Image (tube, helix red, strand yellow):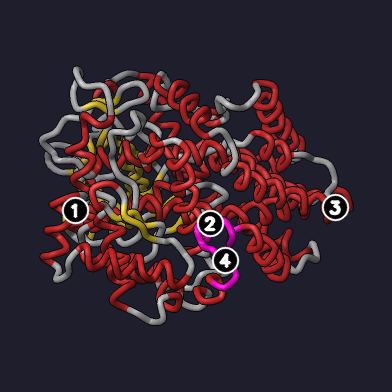
Amino acid sequence: MQEKSSIDLLSNRTILRGYSRHREIFLARLGTYPPETLPQFLHELTHQWCFNSPVGIALALLHLEAAAIDWSKDTAPSARQRARDCLLKAMVALTLLRPVVEGMALFAEFDLMVTSYGELCSKPVLNIATLFRDPSVHIQFGRGSLTANASEHNKWSCSNFLANPFYALRTSPHLIDRKSSLLSSPFSMDGDAYLLGYLLMKSMWVSSFSRFPRLLDPDLFQMLFRSFLFSDSSLVVRLLDPSPCTNESFRQLALHIEGRLLEYLRVPIQQLATQYEEKNKGEPIARVGLMHEIQRAPWEAPALVQDAAHAVSRSLERLARLAFDDSSQKFLALSQSLIDQREAMTILAVDASFQHNTKGMMVITCNGLPVHVMDHKLRNLPDKGQGRFSIHLLPNSARQICLFELHESRELLVDVLLSPPEDGQSEERERNLQAIAQGLSSRAIALELCENAVERVKINCGVDWERTENALRQAAAKTYIPMALLFATDRDEVHTKMRAGGFWTLLGGDTTAVEYLARLSCWSSCLAGDPLVELCRLHGFELNEANDLLINYCASVGFRFFTVGDKGRPLCIA
């Protein structure tokens, strides 16, 4: 699985890469995934979760409006300026949010763990528990929590089937190598800003649990932080404001996002976390429809959330007004799938063949080997042919479905591979599945049309996009770097030393120290006490010796990136 997974920020379409061999396809069809795929799932599920949100919907609507203006062929100066404003707003927000989103995804890979501090489960954890659990364990999806059986009602009671996959991941040589590479990567806002984003999230987490110990639960912290940033109703209103923009407008948008991050470090965190837990304990896991994530964060005034909902409605009305001929109407009808199907993660999509067997069942094969059988005897289908076989995860409901689209007739078939026990069978359920399948099928076409239209707008609006983005990065670095180096005494000096090679250059090229830091940060996320001591011994070093080396480095470089907590457990701010 060497290919890189990806997420499209317009449609929120998340695609996992590398599922092409017969064994991988067949296991995915059974809902079984090898342990080595867990980092990929954690990383991309977190991306998808962040943008399946009010802010994510607002960004998608900005791109859609710019594309719709292009399709409408409206050449009036006001229309061209509006299309330009939409894309510039989206670029400002995405440039500033990208390090945060990458940091959250890396935090999920390296630090997310089950603890007894919080009772809620995030959608990424719910799905990981489903896909990577012990097959002998039955999982029941309840309201706001995940339970092993009907008599157990909190996350901690499920620690075995949630913790085991994380333990296997964090002690694997592959993840240790990946963490070492991350710690030795450039520390800057350039590119994906992986190390900067990761250290930013670690600083936010340590600041959070220092003020409220329940946020030692990394999952609860991620849920709270995501809600604080990506359910920000005032940001939604600012993004979707149709007023003509000036340079000051874009500057204020950037300051709003930077200020939101700074605000998180100052808010009454205990009050916010308590409100969040109380509100979400009674919430159903799955929500449907465009507004499913436009919900009131418990700390936001109802009027502000209503303003955000109105901003979304007005944005949809502007889109509808742009559909004044057959071409633009068809485009907008097709592009609706980019809004309606924002939650789906595509696990694999491959060309396949089909043939009906003697019992009338459709046997789907890849490279001559069977991968799935569909029962569609009541439909008038050809005896054999070619098509596209795909498997999709719907994280909001932890449901997994497969689609088969016939190339010649465009007939679309859908099967449920994995669903919550309470999913049941009903006509309404079947209608919903068909609607999801149609949306997923049209999403790829709609995405290509929208991306082409957006590119035309970018070319014709006279903006130097690369130069503008670089200027945004440089300006944001003045806020982001101090937050990422929250526990450094001389942040400018530490930043200078880390710019080229992260901790490797900070620690004077001491590869052993970087390896110790990588190992202890991964292992201490799931182990403590004697098991951690024994694991260190098995790998040829003493825990106390490693602790002393890293603590001495903290003092000499002026950056408290490592300390020792209760019972000698390492606490890594890296």
Q: Residue 168 has which mark? A: 1
Query: On the image, numbered disc 3 is attached to which residue?
Result: 246
Q: Given this view, does label 2 or label 1 mark the residue nearer the observer?
A: 2
Looking at the rendering, which quadrant does residue 304 occupy?
top right
Q: Are marks 4 and 1 in contact (CB under 8 Å)?
A: no
Q: Residue 491 has which mark? A: 4
Crowd band around label 2 with a 10 angstrom C-alpha radius: few (<14), some (14–19), many (20+): many
User: Which of 565 and 234 lies nearest the eye of the viewer?
Assistant: 565
Above or below: residue 408 compared with residue 336: below
Disc 2 marks a residue whose amino acid type is Leu
The residue lying at 69 percent from left, 22 percent from top is 303
Q: Given this view, does label 3 or label 4 mark the residue nearer the observer?
A: 4
Mark toward the start of the polypeptide (4 vs 1): 1
User: Which of 149 and 2 lies nearest the eye of the viewer?
Assistant: 149
Crowd band around label 1 with a 10 angstrom C-alpha radius: few (<14), some (14–19), many (20+): some
Measure the C-alpha gap from mark 2 to mark 4: 8 Å
Mark toward the start of the polypeptide (2 vs 3): 3
User: Which of 472 and 432 lies nearest the eye of the viewer?
Assistant: 472
Measure the C-alpha gap from mark 2 to mark 1: 31 Å
Magenta span of residues: 480-493
